């Protein structure tokens, strides 16, 4: 954490010499390699550790002997585990689960989603007690593979159930990830989803009263719901014991900027952003959010400088490049915007990403396509959108923008082909697929094809009513999966979960309206991801029309 990589590498190497079967040293060396940008060497180290490490085990705890004494003395959480009797141990069923999960995270970063899923499953098969693998699997399936909410619930419920079964402490990160998913799938307009998310965040904080991730995401949710004072309480609680948490300070600043205009204290917002940068000068996400707020205040030059600094501290941070390109699109020339997008693609491209650069570059190609469409160069726009979908075939933003352009040009056959081709890639009932069905229906309605719009609506409804099986069925997992599950709160991998929460794309930091669009749609930035999004009033109209037709 202090940047003394050479010294850390020396100690980890000596640890392997002393005990080649200890997985912690391989994990540490892999992290150092990742800090240096050498992902291939990091992957090699993890595979070496998986091959050499001995089989581990977990302790099984029994019921408390002196429950009444605990209540009487109000024992702390740290004392709870000591008071639980150990009934025995359960050996792992395979390789080191921590290394498997870490390798899965590395493969996920590289865009190898199927490989990542296999590794997460191998981790929970090896040790059903591994909470980090359950969380990673749930997030991969709901966020990256765009499976429905039940796929995530199955992972989190399995982890919760098995933790209880062996008397292990609840894991705060499981509840935090679960709550985030419930809220994200429901949105701030779904009171039931918000209420369920609050319950889960509370469980997370009961499991770990100092869980920064739970306070952070709860604060963001309350801010989205307009409960600014509640959000402030969450952020302030974290800052009492974690004053240098740049992500909390960033979210705090964004929350303060969203208050009603007459209540916004610009000096307060700017001070929070400055504190975030001071806490972590290399956090490109802070530069991005800070720049977007400064742009709202009208200081475009300062916003440009902040975004440029963000790309300098983290050259592979695609959202910063994207935000900078959008800024140039709006306030400068198309040539400058093109230069920024091109530099960003070169910087963010992965070695295995092909000509399109990999999934990280998809958002840059999509934004570049929007620029070319606005400039009237539709052939160039098509090339950019095609590259975006080559980099990420499920990029809803690229599909939305491309079909909207083709429909505006009267090329409805091409737009329909794009919709039909992409819809096949999504699992039934996923949020992304539902949004594509709605956009498809809206396009036909705009074209005056009422009959076609009704057929699309009926197709989406038939699919929504079809039973689906995207859950992790415990009966399909080896018997050892159901026997025991325990979490290791001291695991270094649990630290990775916090970074995953802090870096997840769940906070909409700015909104860029495009008044020229006939659909009155928006181009919005969600942690730097530019996406075409149908406005709420259009969504309500679709739902109402659909209800009337039924």
Image (spheres, rainbow, N blue to C red):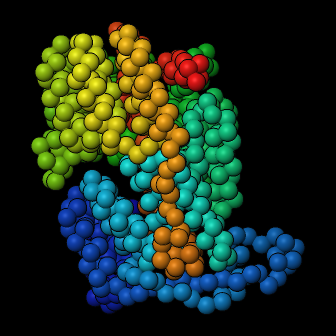
Report the side of 525 relative to 539 (left or right): left
Which of the two residues, 388 or 53, is positioned nearer the viewer here? Answer: 388
Residue beneath the point at 25% across and 29% down: 417
**x and y percent of residue 108 in the render?**
32, 56
Which of the two residues, 168 or 464, is positioned nearer the viewer here? Answer: 464
**x and y percent of residue 112 in the render?**
27, 57
Report the side of 241 relative to 289 (left or right): right
Q: In the figure, 220 relative to 19: above or below? A: above
Q: Is residue 520 visible?
A: yes
Which of the two residues, 193 or 351, is positioned nearer the viewer here? Answer: 193
Q: How many marks?
A: 0
Q: In the figure, 156 relative to 533: above or below? A: below
Q: In the figure, 143 relative to 58: above or below? A: above
Residue beneath the point at 22% across and 42% down: 391
Q: Quadrant of residue 66?
A: bottom right
Report the side of 267 relative to 428 (left or right): right
Residue beneath the point at 33% across and 61% down: 116
In the rendered view of the protein, which quadrant contains the C terminus? top right
**x and y percent of residue 271 in the render?**
50, 32
Residue beneath the point at 64% across and 61% down: 208
Q: In the figure, 368 relative to 467: above or below? A: above
In the rendered view of the protein, which quadrant contains the N terminus? bottom left
Q: Is residue 4 visible?
A: no
Report the side of 137 relative to 356 (left or right): right
**x and y percent of residue 443 in the render?**
36, 18
């Amino acid at each position: 954490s202090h940047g003394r990589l050479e010294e850390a590498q020396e100690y980890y190497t000596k640890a392997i010499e002393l005990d080649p079967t200890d997985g912690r040293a391989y994990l540490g060396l892999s992290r150092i390699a990742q800090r240096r940008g050498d992902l291939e060497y990091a992957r090699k180290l993890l595979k070496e550790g998986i091959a050499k490490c001995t089989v581990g085990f977990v302790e099984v705890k029994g019921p408390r002997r002196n429950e009444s004494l605990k209540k009487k003395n109000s024992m702390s959480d740290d004392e709870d585990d000591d008071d639980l009797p150990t009934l025995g141990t359960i050996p792992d069923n395979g390789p080191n689960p921590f290394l498997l999960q870490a390798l899965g995270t590395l493969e996920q970063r590289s865009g190898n989603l199927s490989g990542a899923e296999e590794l997460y499953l191998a981790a929970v098969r090896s040790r059903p007690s591994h909470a980090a693998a359950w969380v990673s699997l749930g997030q991969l399936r709901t966020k990256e593979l765009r499976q429905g909410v039940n796929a995530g619930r199955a992972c989190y419920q399995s982890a919760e159930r098995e933790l209880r079964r062996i008397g292990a402490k609840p894991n705060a990160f499981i509840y935090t990830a679960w709550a985030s998913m419930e809220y994200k799938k429901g949105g701030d307009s779904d009171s039931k989803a918000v209420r369920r998310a609050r319950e889960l965040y509370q469980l997370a904080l009961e499991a770990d009263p100092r869980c920064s991730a739970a306070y952070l995401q709860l604060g963001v949710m309350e801010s989205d719901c307009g409960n600014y004072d509640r959000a402030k309480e969450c952020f302030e609680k974290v800052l009492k014991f974690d004053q240098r948490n740049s992500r909390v300070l960033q979210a705090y600043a964004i929350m303060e900027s969203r208050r009603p205009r007459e209540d916004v204290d610009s000096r307060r917002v700017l001070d929070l952003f400055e504190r975030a940068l001071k806490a972590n000068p290399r956090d490109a996400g802070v530069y991005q959010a800070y720049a977007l707020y400064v742009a709202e205040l009208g200081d475009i030059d300062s916003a440009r400088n902040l975004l440029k600094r963000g790309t300098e501290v983290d050259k592979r941070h695609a959202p910063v490049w994207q935000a900078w390109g959008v800024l140039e699109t709006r306030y400068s020339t198309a040539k400058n915007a093109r230069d920024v997008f091109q530099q960003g693609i070169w910087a963010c491209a992965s070695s295995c990403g092909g000509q399109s650069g990999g999934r990280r570059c998809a958002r840059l190609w999509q934004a570049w396509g929007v620029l070319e469409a606005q400039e009237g160069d539709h052939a160039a726009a098509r090339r950019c959108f095609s590259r975006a979908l080559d980099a990420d075939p499920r990029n809803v933003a690229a599909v939305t923008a491309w079909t909207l352009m083709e429909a505006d040009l009267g090329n409805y056959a091409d737009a329909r082909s794009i919709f039909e081709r992409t819809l096949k890639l999504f699992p039934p009932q996923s949020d992304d697929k539902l949004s594509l069905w709605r956009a498809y229906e809206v396009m036909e309605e705009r074209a005056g094809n009422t009959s076609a719009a009704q057929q699309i609506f009926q197709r989406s409804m038939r699919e929504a009513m079809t039973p689906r099986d995207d859950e992790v069925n415990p009966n399909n997992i080896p018997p050892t999966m159901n026997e025991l599950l325990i979490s290791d709160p001291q695991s270094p991998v649990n630290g990775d979960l916090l970074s995953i929460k802090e870096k997840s794309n769940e906070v909409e930091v700015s909104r860029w309206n495009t008044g020229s669009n006939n659909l009155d749609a928006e181009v919005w930035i969600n942690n730097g991801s530019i996406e075409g999004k149908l406005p709420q009033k259009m969504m309500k109209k679709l739902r109402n029309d659909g209800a009337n037709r039924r």
